Image (tube, helix red, strand yellow):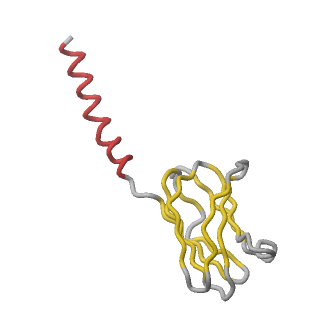
Amino acid sequence: MRRLLVAAAMETMVALPAAIAQAQRAPARLFVAGDEWSLVLSRSSIAPGKAVIQFQNRGEDPHDLKLQRVGGSRVLSLPETRAGEIAHADLRLRTGTYRLWCSLPGHRALGMQAKLRVRRAR
């Protein structure tokens, strides 16, 4: 019985630091710059889980930012911003590919779209 208790304690001591590190992991960060007529991502992929998305309108016209997981129905939104403004959102992203775009009339068709991969680091 004593050996079982010692073994259980050892497993807890090994697993606990990993669990704490996972819980304290900083959110993934993604910066998106938008202008006439493009979206540029600071990176092409991020880890799943908590994420901070910042969208800066570097153009002259107002722009917004929408995100949707391919195959999903929910659309995540950052508000319309004017030239020079920055919007941000704290989100939780699942593994998969996300489409990003500006939803103002005609902007997506003119090139304001991008793809983001959400995946575990290899």
**Most foreground residue, 89 or 94:** 89
Residue 109 in the image, given as x and y percentages of width and height: 81, 73
Residue 84 in the image, given as x and y percentages of width and height: 56, 85
Determine the residue located farthest toward the left in the rendered image. 2
Q: Quadrant of residue 110?
A: bottom right
**Do we see residue 122 in this rendering?**
no
Which residue sits at x=37%, y=47%?
23
Q: Is residue 38 left or right of residue 105?
A: left
Q: Quadrant of residue 77?
A: bottom right
Q: Quadrant of residue 111?
A: bottom right
**Most foreground residue, 3 or 72:** 72
In the picture, the quarter occupied by the N terminus is: top left
Query: Quick check: 35 above or below 46?
Result: below
Q: Is residue 15 left or right of residue 103?
A: left
Which residue sits at x=25%, y=34%?
13
Q: Is residue 3 left or right of residue 117?
A: left
**Do we see residue 93 in this rendering?**
yes
Query: Quick check: 57 above or below 97?
Result: below
**Most foreground residue, 77 or 22:** 77
**Most foreground residue, 18 or 23:** 23
